[in-house]
Image: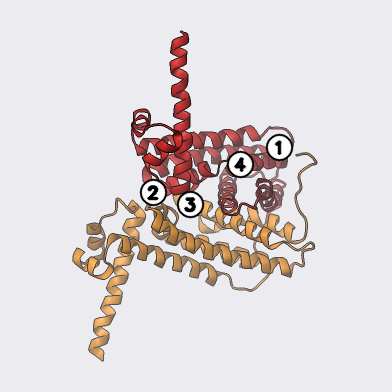
Chain colours: A red, B orange
């Protein structure tokens, strides 16, 4: 038993080291420019071992996308404690999102930029992750709207649109923060909170913006 | 003179037909899956003529990105009349953006999806267009903040972040509207306006959201 466990542990550890190295190299150089030699060297293993564990550059990149997607979704879910009102939950979720992307710049670059530029099969994987986040945010906004007893209630369709707007704004700000290291996670979250909250908050209370007649 | 003009007109017209066909085929199928045969057939010209005019599939795709970028930027600029307050200008700009993307779904797909999945050189071109739109929106928000005499004034850095948030939200909503034909341009613009305006509007009047102490 002890021997089996001793054999299995190194495999899991080694695989993690390979994925860590791969995320870093893919994140810095993009999918096409990254080389398996560099990934193996950074992981401290031979190139044949990388192929033995992860089959091909395509599968290694897919494994990076899956791991980084799962980590990002888990960080956002864990960040939203469920305590406090809707603004507190939104703030907690945004802080968690921007903190995670700031601490994992290569993982974020893989998801936000390189998965798409790598080609359509990878774009499909990252789209699935994005839909999971949009669904989570949609649930939060719908719950907040119910809690606020907005009258008229926000229709499901508008809640879905608001979730798309919020997720798109967060992605854009994380990309911007990633190109300017002086922008902190808290600052990015506060900018988005100020942008979004009063808008969402007003909507939940039934206060809408409307164009002047004819506009 | 008449003859020269008669020869030149068809070239410009034909080139436009080729680009129209290319945007449609690239928009529907993506960069890699699109074939020059299909583009030539849809344009009603021979494949060698497409190569004679536009050199290669890469250059044809780049020409599509440039044309569609310029058209989108021009539509947004033209939409913002400069009349009315900041909310009217934002509303006009958003209507123009969503109307243009709804009327040009293939052009939007080229810019929003396929330019990135096509690979890094194309992603660079579309990033340049995005920066132009962000700069334009930054100017609008800064002008609106000055007009509102916000005290404390919005720092440049925050205005830049707000412009990133607004552009990201608009991109995300246009992508969503593109997958659901029942979402009209006016509805998408109204959703974003309701999301964004009260937030921006409050900020310009110096009313900020702040977290509870310790949050």
Q: Is residue B148 left or right of residue A53?
A: right
A95 or B173, nearer to the observer: A95
Q: Secondary structure at mark 2?
A: loop
Residue at x-position 44% and y-position 65%? B69
- Residue occupying the far bottom of the picture: B1
- Give x and y (percent) for residue B124: 44, 59
Which-is-in-front pick, marks 1 and 3? 3
Q: Earlier in the sequence, mark 1 or mark 4?
A: 4
- Residue A33: mark in rendering: 2
Which-is-in-front pick, marks 3 and 2? 2
| Mark 2, other Cα within 10 Å: few <14 / some 14–19 / many ≥20 | few
Q: Secondary structure at mark 3?
A: helix
Q: Secondary structure at mark 4?
A: helix
- Residue B175: mark in rendering: 3
Which-is-in-front pick, marks 2 and 1? 2
Q: Can I make out residue A128 in this image?
A: no
Residue at x-position 71% and y-position 42%? A87
Q: Is residue B52 left or right of residue B61?
A: left
Question: Chain under label 3?
Answer: B
Q: Are labels 2 and 1 on one chain? A: yes
* Residue corresponding to mark 1: A147
């Amino acid at each position: 038993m002890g021997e089996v466990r001793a054999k299995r542990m190194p495999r899991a550890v080694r695989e993690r080291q390979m994925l860590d190295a791969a995320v870093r190299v893919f994140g810095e150089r993009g999918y096409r420019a990254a080389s398996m030699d560099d990934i193996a060297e950074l992981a401290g293993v031979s190139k044949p071992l990388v192929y033995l564990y992860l089959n091909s550059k395509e599968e290694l990149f897919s494994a990076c996308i899956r791991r980084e997607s799962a980590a990002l979704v888990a960080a956002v879910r864990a960040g939203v404690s469920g305590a406090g009102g809707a603004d507190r939950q939104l703030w907690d979720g945004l802080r968690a999102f921007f903190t995670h992307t700031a601490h994992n710049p290569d993982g974020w670059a893989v998801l936000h930029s390189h998965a798409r530029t790598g080609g359509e099969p990878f774009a499909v994987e990252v789209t699935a992750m994005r839909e999971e986040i949009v669904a989570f945010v949609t649930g939060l906004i719908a719950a907040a709207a119910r809690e606020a007893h907005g009258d008229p209630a926000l229709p499901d369709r508008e809640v879905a649109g608001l979730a798309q707007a919020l997720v798109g704004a967060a992605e854009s700000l994380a990309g911007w923060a990633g190109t300017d290291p002086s922008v902190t996670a808290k600052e990015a979250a506060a900018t988005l909170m100020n942008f979004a909250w009063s808008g969402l908050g007003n909507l939940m209370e039934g206060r809408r913006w409307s164009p002047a007649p004819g506009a």
